[in-house]
Image (cartoon, rainbow, N blue to C red):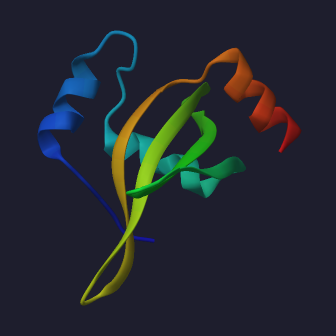
């Protein structure tokens, strides 16, 4: 699985006290159990809810394509809300 992200956004999220994780760490979410659903139609975006370093997070990403094929472009993430936690536990 390939990933991309905006480096300025990555640096901002790493410094944010509420978030504090880099996208390099956030991609580990895809290696474990996670809940995924489409969050937006235009542009087509998805959200994935799962654990990273013992914290439940909600990640927004887009599936994109280039000459090498499909990859996930990470948009943003935040600590999951109670409603998002319920989706994760149900899903």
Quarter of the image containing the C terminus? Answer: top right
Please state which of residues 86 and 31 is positioned toward the viewer in this rendering. 86
- In the image, what residue occupies the spot 35% across and 50% down? 74
Residue extending furthest toward the left: 8
Quarter of the image containing the N terminus? Answer: bottom left
Q: How many marks?
A: 0
- In the image, what residue occupies the spot 59% across and 56% down? 31
Left or right: residue 68 versus residue 1 is left
Residue extending furthest toward the top: 17
Q: Position of residue 16 (x, y in %)?
A: 28, 15
Q: Position of residue 41 (x, y in %)?
A: 49, 56
Left or right: residue 3 versus residue 66 is right
- In the image, what residue occupies the spot 77% across and 34% down? 87
- In the image, what residue occupies the spot 58% across and 46% down? 48
Residue 65, above or below 53: below
Q: Position of residue 15 (x, y in %)?
A: 23, 18
Picture quadrant of residue 65: bottom left
Picture quadrant of residue 83: top right
Residue extending furthest toward the front: 42
Residue 26, above or below 72: above
Left or right: residue 72 versus residue 36 is left
Left or right: residue 69 versus residue 80 is left
Residue extending furthest toward the bottom: 67
Residue 78, above or below 40: above
Q: Position of residue 47 (x, y in %)?
A: 55, 46
Please state which of residues 42 and 79 is positioned toward the viewer in this rendering. 42
């Amino acid at each position: 699985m390939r990933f991309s992200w905006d480096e300025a956004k990555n640096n901002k999220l790493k410094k944010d006290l509420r978030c504090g994780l880099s996208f390099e760490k956030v991609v580990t979410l895809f290696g474990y159990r996670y809940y995924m659903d489409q969050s937006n139609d235009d542009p087509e975006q998805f959200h994935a809810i799962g654990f990273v370093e013992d914290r439940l997070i909600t990640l927004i990403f887009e599936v994109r394509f280039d000459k090498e094929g499909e990859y996930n472009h990470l948009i943003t993430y935040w600590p999951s809300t109670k409603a998002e936690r319920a989706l994760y536990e149900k899903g």
